């Protein structure tokens, strides 16, 4: 088991992801393709390898996922528009400083059309609703500089109704608290909307700190297994609450590093011994960034994007990770 982040291997792993087009897994994950590119690109930026992928190739693929009829992006060329890959497309274009390639008014219209009378957002025209989609809408509109077009009061009112007695949030009204689908998305959305006053900070921070298990990993709900991706979901909310120090950072760092594929292929899995994937690679690296791991670029926990890019757009909100440690030789 490696005791350090295997950056060159992970960079190579991400670079090779799109080359396995004859692999069945490649085709079975087409519904996540645009999201996966965002995950991989964000991990590369966080590891300080922003030029590891061909910029024009990536942008051309993003453009090929455009759904002209809907005015949004699908996860893969020919797929129907959905709010999730639409955000991924926006995030990719923002990272590459290429928003001029986007029909912003049409995308904004598409996103706003998905808000329901209750205030929650649907993912697409088929109508599935979830607080994840509310966060995605808030994030996307903020990145596009169009947050003023959102019905903020209605959006916040629905999120408030998803708050539970334990301080956490669920994915819908009455759903149990969940670190990712509930807490992160609700807390981050409220942060962007400058309504963090709706959060019971102390109670929620305790609930989040209790997600750490004896092996150092974090889970998303009580009585569940640890999973590397919660290294971001839990830490991001704690960073917004400025309480990252409430968890054992050394044990969590060791857990994330233990889930690496330390052969020639690279990548990070959900837990040691499992298959790696780009989702857990991204969120493992993201968690390490918030923990102040040496050599990484700051990751903004509100937008889940490189902090320098968010700061350059004037969008940074209050948050605090651990101080960046200096690598020892």
Image: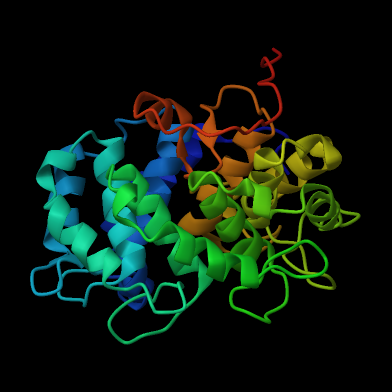
Q: Which x, y percent locates residue 70?
A: 15, 73
Q: Nearer the viewer, residue 144 or 215?
A: 144
Which residue appears at 72% of the width and 77% of the height?
A: 176
Q: Nearer the viewer, residue 309 or 198?
A: 198
Q: Is residue 117 above or below residue 108?
A: below
Q: Which x, y percent locates residue 28?
A: 36, 78
Q: Quadrant of the N terminus?
A: top right
226 displayed left or right of 317: right
Coloration of the structure image: rainbow
Q: Which x, y percent locates residue 160?
A: 62, 65
> Dividing the picture into quarters, in which one does residue 81 lie?
bottom left
Q: How many callouts does the rendering have? A: 0
Which residue appears at 71% of the width and 14% of the height?
A: 328
Q: Is residue 196 above or below residue 174?
A: above
Residue found at the very far front of the displayed protein: 153
Is residue 193 visible to us here?
Answer: yes
Q: Which x, y percent locates residue 193?
A: 49, 48
Residue found at the very far left of the displayed protein: 68
Q: Is residue 13 above or below residue 158?
A: above
> Dividing the picture into quarters, in which one does residue 242 lie?
top right
> Dividing the picture into quarters, in which one does residue 30 lie?
bottom left
162 displayed left or right of 39: right
Is residue 264 visible to us here?
Answer: no
Which residue appears at 32% of the width and 51% of the height?
A: 141
Residue found at the very far right of the displayed protein: 214
Q: Quadrant of the C terminus?
A: top right
79 displayed left or right of 329: left
124 displayed left or right of 265: left
């Amino acid at each position: 088991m490696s005791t350090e982040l295997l950056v060159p291997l992970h960079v190579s792993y991400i670079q090779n992801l799109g080359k396995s087009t004859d692999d069945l897994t490649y085709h079975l994950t087409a519904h996540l393709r645009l999201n996966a590119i965002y995950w991989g690109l964000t991990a590369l930026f966080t590891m300080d390898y922003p030029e590891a992928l061909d910029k024009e190739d990536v942008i051309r693929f993003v453009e090929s996922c455009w759904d002209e009829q809907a005015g949004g992006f699908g996860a893969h060329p020919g797929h129907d528009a959905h709010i999730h890959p639409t955000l991924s497309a926006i995030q990719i274009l923002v990272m590459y400083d290429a928003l001029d390639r986007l029909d912003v008014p049409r995308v904004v219209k598409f996103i706003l059309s998905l808000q329901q009378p209750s205030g929650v957002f649907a993912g697409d025209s088929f109508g599935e609703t979830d607080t994840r989609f509310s966060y995605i809408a808030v994030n996307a509109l903020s990145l596009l500089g169009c947050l003023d077009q959102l019905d903020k009061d209605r959006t916040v009112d629905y999120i408030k109704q998803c708050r539970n007695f334990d301080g956490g949030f669920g994915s819908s009204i009455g759903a149990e608290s969940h670190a990712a689908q509930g807490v992160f998305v609700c807390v981050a959305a409220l942060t962007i909307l400058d309504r963090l006053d709706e959060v019971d900070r102390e109670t929620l921070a305790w609930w989040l700190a209790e997600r750490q298990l004896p092996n150092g990993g974090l889970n998303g709900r009580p009585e569940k297994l640890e999973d590397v991706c919660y290294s971001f979901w839990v830490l991001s909310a704690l960073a917004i609450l400025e309480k990252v120090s409430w968890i054992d950072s050394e044990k969590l760092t060791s857990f994330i590093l233990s889930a690496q594929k330390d052969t020639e292929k690279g990548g990070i899995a959900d837990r040691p011994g499992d298959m790696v994937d780009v989702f857990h690679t991204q969120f493992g690296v993201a968690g390490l960034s918030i923990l102040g791991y040496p050599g990484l670029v700051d990751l903004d926990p509100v937008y889940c994007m490189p902090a320098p890019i968010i700061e350059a757009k004037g969008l940074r909100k209050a948050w605090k990770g651990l101080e960046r440690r200096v690598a020892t030789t």
